[in-house]
Image (tube, rainbow, N blue to C red):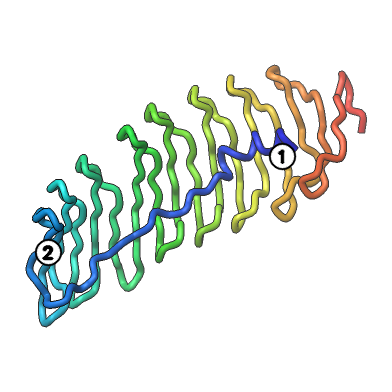
């Protein structure tokens, strides 16, 4: 089902959250730690043998890499940076819950994606961008699953797809031509295409109906001037 892959790919593609690393308590509790070349790696702060206050991490070339705030050995907030100074990740621990914002960039420096996590699971909104800064997709999550509305955009700025999800499963989808007109209406049951998918031309006229059973195309029939069913 080639056309299904084309239509679903822009919004269903999932990217795993960025791996996270937190400083570990060094033996001997030094105030500073260095790379082999002598460059500063960490600046530590302690109280009663535990991390307390601000711990700073640096790239081997000297740029700020991370800032970690501790209280009595527990992380309460942190920021991680790219070499060019852009914020890559921010974490806050509130009432024992870890609230995290992740920001990812293209290799050339433009923002690629921004999303939020709660206790290491995607929750809330994820926004994705084309390399030119134009909006590519907006998705919503609950407990690591797609939930609620999701929209994808063509690289010309026109709406590509408008989806509704429930606990990770699609329940409906509208797909659009690059020029902005409605192309298809998809219907789902149990997360799979089932029933009729309606296909329209750019003038808004219904031109075909596709019948699906559990994601399998059973038949496609053109509609010419009058409905056949």
Q: Residue furthest right?
A: 228
**Which numbered mark, 2 or 1, is in the foreground of this view?**
2
Q: Is residue 174 visible?
A: no
Is 74 above or below relative to 13? below
Residue drawn at 18 percent across, 65 percent down: 69
- In the displayed structure, 139 sits above or below 133; it is below
144 relative position to 195: left or right? left
Specify the farthest residue to the bottom. Answer: 48
Q: In this picture, is 65 found above or below 225?
A: below
Mark 2 crowdedness (10 Å alpha carbons): few <14, some 14-19, many ≥20: some
| Residue 104: image location, x then y, percent | 36, 44
Q: Quadrant of the C terminus?
A: top right
Residue in the foreground of this view, choosing between 181 and 10: 10
Using residue 99 as the reference point, say whether residue 24 is left or right of it. left
How many numbered marks does the figure carry?
2
Q: Is residue 168 visible?
A: yes
User: Which mark is first along the chain, 1 or 2?
Assistant: 2
**Is 96 on the left-hand or right-hand side of 226?**
left
For the point 9% across and 71% down, which residue is it?
30
Q: For mark 1, what is the residue?
A: 186
Taking the spot 54% from the left edge, 43% from the top edge, the residue there is 150
Residues at marks 2 and 1 touching, judged by CB atoms closer than 8 Å: no
Residue pointed to by mark 2:
33
Q: Position of residue 154 (x, y in %)?
A: 53, 28
Give the percent coordinates (x, y) of residue 126: 44, 47
The one nearer the camera, 110 or 58, is 58
Give whichever of 157, 4 is nearer the camera.
Answer: 4
């Amino acid at each position: 089902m080639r056309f299904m892959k084309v239509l679903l790919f822009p919004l269903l593609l999932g990217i795993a959250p960025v791996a996270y690393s937190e400083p570990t308590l060094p033996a001997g509790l030094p105030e500073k730690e260095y790379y082999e070349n002598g460059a500063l790696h960490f600046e530590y702060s302690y109280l009663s043998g535990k991390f307390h206050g601000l711990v700073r991490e640096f790239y081997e070339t000297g740029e700020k890499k991370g800032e970690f705030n501790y209280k009595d050995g527990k992380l309460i907030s942190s920021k991680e940076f790219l070499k060019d100074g852009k914020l890559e990740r921010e974490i806050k621990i509130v009432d024992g819950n870890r609230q995290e914002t992740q920001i990812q960039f293209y290799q050339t420096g433009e923002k690629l994606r921004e999303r939020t996590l709660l206790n290491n699971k995607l929750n809330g909104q994820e926004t994705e961008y084309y390399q030119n800064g134009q909006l590519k997709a907006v998705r919503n999550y609950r407990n690591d699953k797609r939930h609620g509305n999701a929209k994808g955009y063509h690289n010309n700025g026109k709406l590509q797809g408008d989806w509704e999800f429930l606990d990770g499963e699609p329940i409906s989808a509208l797909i659009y031509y690059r020029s902005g007109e409605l192309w298809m209406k998809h219907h789902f049951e149990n997360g799979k295409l089932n029933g009729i998918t309606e296909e329209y031309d750019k003038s808004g006229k219904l031109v075909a109906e596709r019948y699906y059973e559990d994601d399998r195309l059973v038949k496609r029939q053109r509609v010419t001037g009058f409905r056949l069913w």
